[in-house]
Amino acid sequence: MTTSPNERRKPPTIHDVARVAGVSRGTVSRYLNGGHYVSPAARQSVEVAIKKTGYVVNRHARSLSTGRSDSVAFLLTEPQEKFFEDPNFNVLLRACTKALAERDITLLLMIAGTPDERRRNLRYITSGHVDGVLLVSSHSGDPVAAELRDAGVPLVACGRPMGIGAPGAKVSYVAADDRDGARDMVRHLLSLGRRRIATVTGPLDTPGGVDRLAGYREVLAEAGIEADERLIVTGDYSRASGEAAVARLLADGVEFDAMFVASDLMAQGVMSALAQAGLRVPDDVAIGGFDDSPAALATQPALTTIRHPLDRISSEMVRVLLAQISGEAPATVILPTELVRRGSA
Amino acid sequence: MTTSPNERRKPPTIHDVARVAGVSRGTVSRYLNGGHYVSPAARQSVEVAIKKTGYVVNRHARSLSTGRSDSVAFLLTEPQEKFFEDPNFNVLLRACTKALAERDITLLLMIAGTPDERRRNLRYITSGHVDGVLLVSSHSGDPVAAELRDAGVPLVACGRPMGIGAPGAKVSYVAADDRDGARDMVRHLLSLGRRRIATVTGPLDTPGGVDRLAGYREVLAEAGIEADERLIVTGDYSRASGEAAVARLLADGVEFDAMFVASDLMAQGVMSALAQAGLRVPDDVAIGGFDDSPAALATQPALTTIRHPLDRISSEMVRVLLAQISGEAPATVILPTELVRRGSA
DNA sequence: CTGAAAGCGCTTACAG
DNA sequence: CTGAAAGCGCTTACAG
């Protein structure tokens, strides 16, 4: 055997390319970095040499030299269960990966569930291993955003970070227009002739919790419907909390003919609890969800819901982050949502 | 302003540590790499110096020097839709990220949906930017495994790679025992007194497709039940294909009192189609799924299914990969599944 | 436009 | 056990 299949040959370096092309290493490097100050003839022979040698840049060497890493962290600060349940993460992650790959920058996935993981990841990030971070978290007072910002790490969060006041600059974020989405849904429920509209909110220390509730209140007020606080139940985005909310409503003996539920997953729980109680959707109670996740198609009937522009959220996150990395100031981007009508309302 | 919040200070190097500790850089490096040939006194002062300076190793420099990158790729070669729908990916990805983080090695997420992405990723990987790859794909004759193997890149696949014959060494993989899981489920259905058991398979160019079908046939045969090919419908793991399967069975006028469905997602489709047809689960037809995904809890009644040991699959993948990176031969690991009883059967 | 050279921060034989 | 030194593969002023 002259060549073991498991043996990785030492890859060609810029030096090999230079030799083959008959130029200096500096010239090859200049070609690689934009081609400025390289004569057409030199460019030619370098291109040929690169093809011939199969050269590809060694990014470790480049990073050591430039101080940039050409990579960003996708940092998830979720307790484990959330990550499993929330389908938004999938879409977000996928879209960010794509957007970055197109720009030839690599995505490091980091998950900070435990305090230990948190510490490790923070250390990694702040010690300059990545050029910036895409932060995804719906944690309440998650301090990680503030820490990163204060460490001067380029950063953009998915969704409005809460409870970050205090020192230093703002932190960039891109988010869907939660409040407006909620308004659309509640108006839709009203247009169906429903008047006793209950709501299951997200946790009230998350933007999705407070903003969607705000939209709900707003529309009812503008419709001249008196607020009935018994109609408002706080959930935590989980299926189970949707079921619990229905149980609560039923136990309290409150009447309602519609529900605006702040996540599809909770809506799923709501619908199965309703079915168990012998209530029919949409006949007895119309249901509106939020997210347009796969769960929205799994219910019977399918769920009327609000769609996040997750693809655009992702691409905007990447755009804003890269801008920041190259020196621009933080920015915030709010994207419109869309009502998706299906069978439940 | 003496210090702008957005300014990242230049991090301390091994040189700073050496100076503070009063030793040479070589000694610091030796301490960092296992502490061999370092006197207790030197160790002491280096530790103090590291703490004082806040030193953390520059991995680019280290990689350049050692040739290792201390990172691995998590490569997904799925068409986009699959990734969104399949909850197994989530769990797998999460668990791999954790297992790697514990060993201080970083996970690069790469998704090869299009041929273009495939090429880019392959180039990245084969040019030595990562030490190895965790390959996740249920593609039929996905050539990526063979290419990686032939390029000598340490590699472990999730699930049995199909259609990789030919040259070179074997490729490592770790998989659940699909056939045995299928056997358990069909036996369970039999134990319920069902005799006309239909099945919806996965694509027959995937291990989950062929192995689960094989288990089904095996148990029926050993129970002395004649095979009725009209009872076997091929699906593609999607919810829609579950619905289609039921439509097909009903249109064909085949009788059945149970179904073994090769994925929970398909089972979801099956159940909604059954409901639409006025058939009751489990009374009229008992349903057994496969995966124990979140979808299994979303159905009404909840789904009896087969659980993959995803956590163990992930940790085994990481273990086998790291072993291979440090020179060991490829290995294959098969892990047992578990029957989870719920309402549908 | 181009080459020679220094430097990025680490690791690792090599002497001692 | 320890230090001096070479080398990993690139980039980037600096001269020319």
Image (spheres, coloured by chain):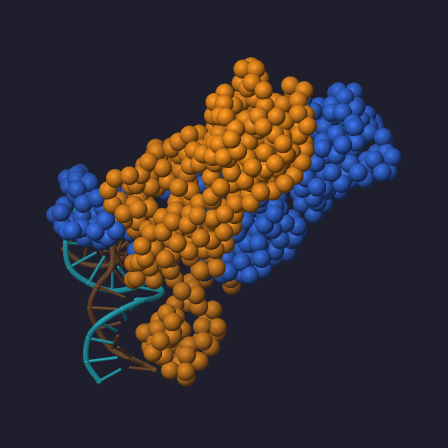
Chain colours: A blue, B orange, C cyan, D brown
Left or right of B238: which side holds B21?
A: left
Residue placed at 48% from the left, 29% from the top?
B201
Vertical placement of residue A88 versus A337, above or below: below
Indicate the position of residue A249 as horizontal and vertical percent values. Answer: 82, 36
Query: Front-most of B229 and A3?
Result: B229
Visible residue check, residue A90: no
Vertical placement of residue B256 versus D11, above or below: above
Indicate the position of residue A20 as horizontal and vertical percent values. Answer: 13, 47
Indicate the position of residue B69 as horizontal and vertical percent values. Answer: 35, 56
Query: Front-most of A55 and A226?
Result: A55
Visible residue check, residue A98: yes
Where, quadrant-wise, is the C terminus of chain A in this rendering? top right
Vertical placement of residue B67 versus B31, above or below: above
**Residue lying furthest front in this view?**
B224
Residue placed at 47% from the left, 22% from the top?
B229
Left or right of A240: which side holds A1?
A: left
Query: Front-most of A322 and A293?
Result: A293
Vertical placement of residue B335 versus A181, above or below: below
Residue placed at 21% from the left, 44% from the top?
A54
**Residue lying furthest right in this view?**
A253
Residue placed at 44% from the left, 29% from the top?
B203
Query: Front-most of B174 and A149?
Result: B174
Indicate the position of residue B335 as horizontal and vertical percent values. Answer: 47, 48
